[in-house]
Structure formats: C-alpha cells, structure tokens
Image (tube, helix red, strand yellow):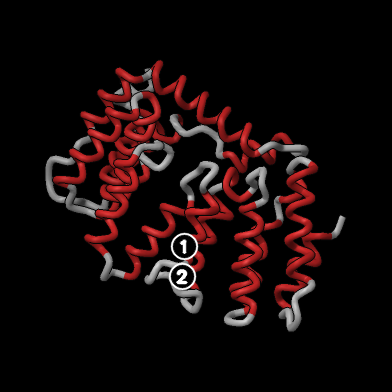
C-alpha cells in the first residue's frame, strides 16, 4: 500500500523499505552477539520481504526510471533513492533478475548517483557478474580519484566469509596508498563501519587485517591510525571467542615499539573493562 500510494514521498517509501543495519541490530542485542547469525538472519528477513513485495517493487522500479536530463533536486533525489532501494530488494528476491536490471541500467546511466546506486544494489548478491561490473566501473573511472574512493568503499562493505581476503587484496591494489587518508578512510572506514560480518568474522581475520593496517599507518600517519583504531570500539558487544580475538589484536598493537600516543590512547581506552 505504501509503495502504491502516489501521495507519499519517494524518500519516505525508500526509508520504509530499509531494515535496521547489522550494527544497529548488534547494539540492540547488546551482548554475546554472533555477527554471522545477525548477517544471515537480516538477509533472510530482507529476502522474505522482497519476495512478498516483488510485484510492487518491480512497479516502483519501473515508475522511477529517469526519462530526462539529470536533476539534482529533491524530487529527483527521492526518485533515485526509491529506485535503487527497490532494485536492491529485487536482487535479494531474484538475483538473476537483479543482475539483468543493473546491467540494463548501466548501459544508459548518465550520472554517478544512479551508477553507484545500481552497483550498490548488487553488493550482497554473490554472483560473478557483481565483480565483473565493479571491474568495469573501475576501468571507466580509474582516472578520477574521488570516484575510485567510491569504488574502494563499495567493495569494503561486501559481506561474506572472504571479506578480509578481499580487503587484503585491495590493500595491495596499485591505486591504494596508505599515505592518502581519503583512500584509507574509503576502504578501511567502509570495512569497520559498514561490514560487521566481515570485521567480526568468527576466525578473527577481520580484526587481524584491521590491526595490520593500524600497525602500518602508525609509522606513516598516527592520526589516521588512531581514527582506524576506533573500529575496535564495538568489540565488547560480541561473543567470547570474538572478544578474545579482538583483545589479542589490540594487545599486539599496544606491544608495538614506537607506538604513537594517539593510537595508544584509543586502544588502551577501548580495552578497559
């Protein structure tokens, strides 16, 4: 009914379709959180909702197609918000259809908001086309540093058991520079702030990658290293095995020779009971 109501603003409709984030769910649970269970449960609910609303979502997606030149006004922003929120849910309900719609959109897209919106709709879809489309995005925009920041940021939030391996690979990418704060914030800030199932992976790999980055940054830019260290702040919400792994990585950081006072302050405060 909400999607079909012409009187309601598209921004409101888009917001009504968005579930609480995994980080918000973890905060509500409050303790002994298993990030993998939270991720899979949220995705299951999202998929069930999407399947139930699939017909209405397809209609909303079709209605919000851009028919003229890009307009950065309120109405246009709301329309794009609803369009790509609906597309993400369509992809959750039917991955093959979602991929086809994104591919079709990218052929004719003429603005960055729509292009990134289409790609973001596929980030939780585990299909080879997703990575192919991300590679094509890089090829199109590799000479624009701000857009490549977006490219790193989009990949940082892709969930899954291979999230930390993806981050490690991106850390060695020719366009990633530890000496460029915005590039670090795009990748590692995206990972720590937008990928709980990756950061809090059961095997501790997310914590290890974050600690490795902090160690590296400590010698290059202690202020950026300290900002990345805040990524550990939610560790006490999670279950005992995860807490032990996070604690071990933070202790490893504190044991570093020539640790900056900025990093020491954040990590030592985070470790306090």
- The residue pinned by badge 2 equals 182
Count of numbered labels shown in the rendering:
2
Q: Are marks 2 and 1 in contact (CB under 8 Å)?
A: yes
- Mark 1: secondary structure: helix
Residue 43 picture location, percent across and down: 51, 30
- What residue sits 51% from the left and 60% below the top? 168
Q: Is residue 122 left or right of residue 139?
A: right
Q: Quadrant of residue 67?
A: top left
The foreground one among 102 and 78 is 102
SS at mark 2? helix
In the rendered image of this protein, does residue 166 appear above or below residue 99? below
Q: In the rendered image, which quarter contains the N terminus?
A: top left
Q: Position of residue 224 (x, y in %)?
A: 59, 73
Please provide percent x and percent y for residue 197. 59, 43
Q: Residue 32: give x, y in percent of width and height.
A: 77, 37
Foreground residue, 47 or 132?
132
Residue at x 71% of width, y 56% of height: 233
Residue at the image point whose x is 40% and y is 37% from the top: 126
Q: Residue furthest left?
A: 68
Q: Nearer the viewer, residue 236 or 165?
A: 165
Where residue 252 sits, quadrant-wise, is bottom right
Residue under label 1: 186
């Amino acid at each position: 009914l909400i999607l079909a109501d012409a009187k309601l603003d598209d921004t409101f409709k888009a917001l009504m379709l968005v579930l609480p984030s995994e980080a918000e769910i973890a905060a509500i649970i409050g303790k002994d959180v298993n990030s993998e269970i939270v991720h899979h449960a949220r995705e299951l609910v999202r998929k069930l909702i999407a399947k139930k609303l699939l017909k209405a979502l397809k209609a909303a997606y079709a209605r919000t197609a851009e028919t003229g030149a890009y307009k950065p006004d309120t109405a246009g922003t709301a329309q794009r918000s609803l369009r790509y929120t609906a597309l993400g849910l369509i992809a959750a309900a039917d991955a093959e259809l979602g991929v086809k719609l994104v591919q079709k959109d990218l052929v004719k897209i003429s603005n960055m908001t729509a292009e990134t919106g289409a790609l973001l709709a596929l980030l939780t879809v585990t299909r080879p086309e997703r990575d192919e489309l991300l590679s094509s995005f890089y090829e199109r925009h590799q000479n624009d540093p701000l857009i490549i920041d977006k490219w790193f940021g989009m990949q940082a939030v892709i969930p899954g058991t291979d999230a930390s391996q993806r981050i490690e690979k991106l850390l060695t990418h020719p366009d990633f520079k530890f000496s460029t704060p915005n590039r670090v914030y795009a990748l590692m800030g995206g990972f720590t702030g937008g990928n709980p199932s990756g950061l809090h992976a059961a095997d501790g790999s997310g914590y290890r990658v974050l600690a490795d980055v902090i160690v590296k940054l400590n010698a290059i830019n202690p202020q950026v290293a300290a900002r990345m260290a805040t990524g550990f702040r939610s560790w006490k919400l999670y279950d005992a095995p995860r807490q032990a792994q996070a604690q071990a990585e933070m202790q490893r950081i504190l044991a570093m020779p020539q640790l900056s006072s900025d990093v020491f302050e954040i990590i030592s405060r985070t470790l306090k009971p």
